[in-house]
Image (cartoon, grey):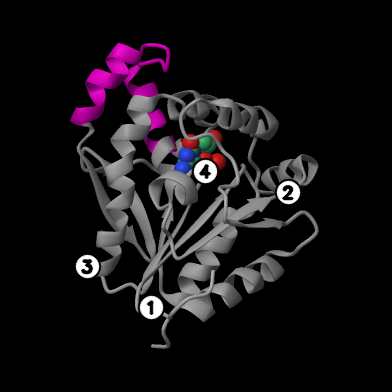
Amino acid sequence: MSGPTKDFVIVAIDGGAASGKSTSARALSERFHLLHVDTGSFYRGITAEFLRRGVAATDTDTVRGSLASLALATRLEGRSARMEIGGRVVPDAEIRSREVNDRVSHFAALPDVRNALLAYQRGQAGVARRHGFKGVVMEGRDIGSVIFPDADLRFFLQADPVERARRRASEGQQDSIVERDRLDSSRKTAPLACPPGAVSIDTTHLTPVEVVAQLAEAIAARLSPA
Ligand code: DC
């Protein structure tokens, strides 16, 4: 991962549910003035919208037909990119609901849904440049493999499932992590996997501060000083 320093960097962080991606990405965005992009929230937003419309993931024709009409846009909230659907940001309470936790992997497995989000996700680099950020820290499942395979830095976070369930429960969330990871890892399109060449970190026994320190060291080596 060595190379010349740059004025604008793309940092990809992939990993399973509750592997430590969001906590790390938020801290890094603050530290280096990077746009924080949580792509899981995009899949969750689309899932919430389809649930609201009463469309099931098995109804692939309706899903395909509706995707073009979603009118996706981006709104900045602090250093984070929030997805707008038809001018509305789907509230956190809705995208983190039990129903969305249960359904999101089914919608995320559909190639049409992934295609609809591909250009939108890549476009976040332009959003970051336009707003004067020093880069993007994007978290998800396929960022270092599909969305930005040429990212300046690519990380893959892992943690023991028992520890991950404990983290989610401590956030007050009910989430079937093992089942979601199974679905996300076994789907045909862009499955969850550590992409070749990415730096893999096991966060089971690390504190968030320790994880961030490792990632920050690598970013500091690539990003030109302000
Ligand atoms: O990171 P998260 O748990 O909020 O992600 C929610 C779901 O979205 C996850 O179960 C799989 C899907 N997802 C995906 O398929 N690809 C991404 N880049 C991000 C999330």
- Please give the range of residues in magenta: 44-69
In x, y percent, where is residue 149? Answer: 43, 52
Assess mark 4: CB under 8 A from ligand 1?
yes
Q: Would you place residue 95 above or below residue 102 in this image?
A: below
Identify the disc placed on residue 141. 4
Whether residue 64 is in magenta: the answer is yes
Identify the residue at horizontal 56%, vertical 47% (top origin): 195
Q: Which residue is mark 3?
A: 130
Q: Which residue is mark 2?
A: 159
Q: Residues within 10 Å of mark 4 (few under 14, many from 20)?
A: many
What amino acid type is highlighted by mark number 2?
Ala
Q: Alpha carbon of mark 3 to alpha carbon of mark 4: how far?
A: 26 Å
Identify the disc placed on residue 6. 1
What amino acid type is highlighted by mark number 3?
Arg
In x, y percent, where is residue 81? Answer: 35, 56
Q: Alpha carbon of mark 3 to alpha carbon of mark 1: how far?
A: 17 Å
Is the C-beta separation of discs 4 and 2 under 8 Å? no
Look at the magenta stretch and give its main secondary structure.
helix
